[in-house]
Image (cartoon, rainbow, N blue to C red):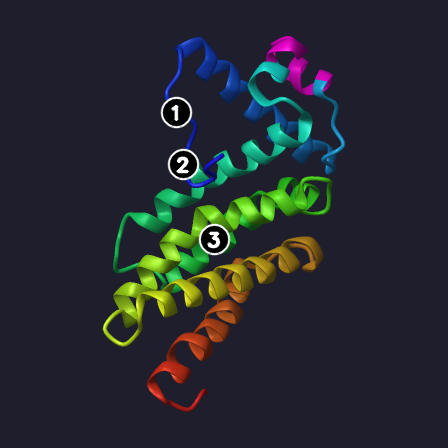
Amino acid sequence: MDLNVAEPARDRRVRRSRAALMRAAVELVTERGTAAVTLSDIAEAADVSRRVVYQHFGDRDALLLEAGLDLVRRELLPHLADDPRVAAGREQALAVARHFAGHRAFYRALLTGSCAFALDRGLIGVLLPINRQAIQRLHGDRLTREAIDDLAAFLTGGAGSFVTSWVVDGADPLDPEAFTDRLMGVMSVLTTSHLTGEEPR
């Protein structure tokens, strides 16, 4: 399964059922603060049968994973990809922080539950192309294609770990502005001083 793209277009009823199931999953996990919700509860909240859940997703973890990735695609990616001047900058980092803070209960439950590894890998897959493009724009004339790919993977994985730690263990309420300042400080050291020879601040 390619985690970078949304599911292909299907029959309108199928799309509605999938969307209802993913919405119900996000709402129930958020409300209960745990990923240990039953498929029966999700199906009931989405007003579909358990059979429909199995047909679309196979099991609960697959549904929760797709619900998390769908939330990122729908609510976060539009803020990251629209304006090339924003990419890799503070506004992009702040959009990420605000998204995860706004859905903290949901992501915290998933990132500490049985689908944590799959969600982490899925989020990296979704965000990696954006970081690769940003690095290409900033440093493409000084780096090989392989170095750009390596740096994008390193930064995406590292930033993902940083966000996960903040979402899971950060003090309530999460402060997206302060977190963004921390993240930008780290990114600045990694992407600027070592590439240009400048001393870190």
- Give amino acid for label 2: Val
Circle nearer the viewer, 3 or 1: 1
Q: Position of residue 26 (x, y in %)?
A: 60, 31
Residue designated by label 2: 5
- Give amino acid for label 3: Val
Circle nearer the viewer, 2 or 3: 2
Residue depicted at x 46% and y 70%: 184
Q: Residues within 10 Å of mark 3 (few under 14, many from 20)?
A: many
Residue designated by label 1: 8
Q: Which residues are magenta?
A: 40-52
Task: Give SS at disc 1.
Answer: loop
Residue depicted at x 55% and y 64%: 158
Q: Residues within 10 Å of mark 2 (few under 14, many from 20)?
A: few
- The picture quadrant where one finds residue 166 is bottom right
Residue depicted at x 73% and y 33%: 32
Q: Position of residue 91 (x, y in %)?
A: 38, 59
Task: Give SS at disc 2.
Answer: loop
Distance from disc 3 to disc 1, alpha carbons, whole Å, reads: 25 Å
Which of 200 and 156 lies nearest the eye of the viewer?
A: 156
Vertical side of 118 occupied by 98: above or below: below
Residue depicted at x 44% and y 59%: 93
Q: Quadrant of the C terminus?
A: bottom left
Which of 191 and 174 lies nearest the eye of the viewer?
A: 191
- The picture quadrant where one finds residue 162 is bottom right
Residue designated by label 3: 96
Q: Are marks 3 and 1 in contact (CB under 8 Å)?
A: no
Distance from disc 2 to disc 3, alpha carbons, whole Å, reads: 18 Å
Q: Position of residue 178 (x, y in %)?
A: 54, 66
Q: Is 162 part of what is drawn in magenta?
A: no
